[in-house]
Amino acid sequence: MSTARAPARPILYRQLALRLMVPLVLIVTAVGAAGLFSARAETATVFDRWLLDAAVSLADQVRGGNGGAANAVDLPEAARAMLAYDEIDRTWFSVVDGGRVLVGSAGIPADGSAAVDYPDGRAFDAVYEGARVRVAAVRAPCAGCEHVTVLVAETMLKRQRSNRVVQWLLMPLGLMLVVTCSAIWIAVRRTVRPLEALAERWNRQALASLRTIPEGDLPHELSPFATALNGLLSRIR
């Protein structure tokens, strides 16, 4: 004949610690995730604006053709070198009239993923020359340039470095979570300890001599429990 095992009894200090730690972990995780998302989104917007500003500046140099003349780009060599220079990332630019490249590098993608529309253009992710790039695309504002698109592509090294910096800035939040959970665990253990001491005193002296347990050094919340025990001892005597 098999006997069913009694269910495991809950441990008070573990229950208290979990009830305090779980909401804390959820709140800190939510705050950290929201902060990380917001910081990354703001950083991406800043880099996109820089890229779009370069594309808009280049679009302002496009000159519309008059009398059937083809569109052209008034861009000195020094300006080209300055536009393509970047100490960290590689940068490419292109001015495309329909399918014809007026100036710059050929083959820069005109569309991609993770696109974001801005008042003066759009930015999106793409792959160019085997590298992941962020591309800014704007329309030339000159008359007769309806089909002229300016593209500026840049690799993502600065963006990746910025994201890593943001992640490192969140490390103190994780450290604070670990320290706070440890403090909660220690505080709960110390809070439950008087109850354990009361049970130990009951087992040590009350069961043998039926003497009452002194209540003067007990926490206020345990006084009703000790009073009930002392009343039981008195009635037994």
Image (cartoon, helix red, strand yellow):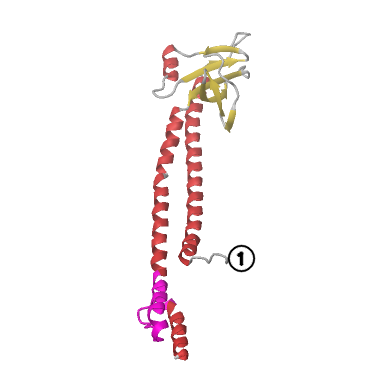
Asked which quadrant contains residue 98, the reply is top right
Give whichever of 43, 202 is nearer the camera. Answer: 202
- 157 lies left or right of 118: left
Give whichever of 230, 43 is nearer the camera. Answer: 230
Q: Is residue 142 visible?
A: no
Residue positioned 51% across, 50% down in the render: 30
Quadrant that contains the N terminus: bottom right
Give whichever of 75, 188 is nearer the camera. Answer: 188
Residue positioned 46% across, 20% down in the render: 91
- 78 lies left or right of 139: left
**Residue type indicated by callout 1:** Ala
The main secondary structure of the magenta stretch is helix
Is residue 25 in the magenta section?
A: no
Residue 120, given in percent of the width and then of the height, sits at 56, 29
| Position of 236 relative to 81 (above/below) | below
Please give the residue where the numbered disc 1 appears in the rendered image: 4
Quadrant that contains the C terminus: bottom left
Residues in magenta, as a range: 193-221
Is residue 201 in the magenta section?
A: yes
Residue positioned 48% across, 23% down in the render: 154
Report the residue that reaches farthest toward the front.
1
Give whichever of 157, 236 is nearer the camera. Answer: 236
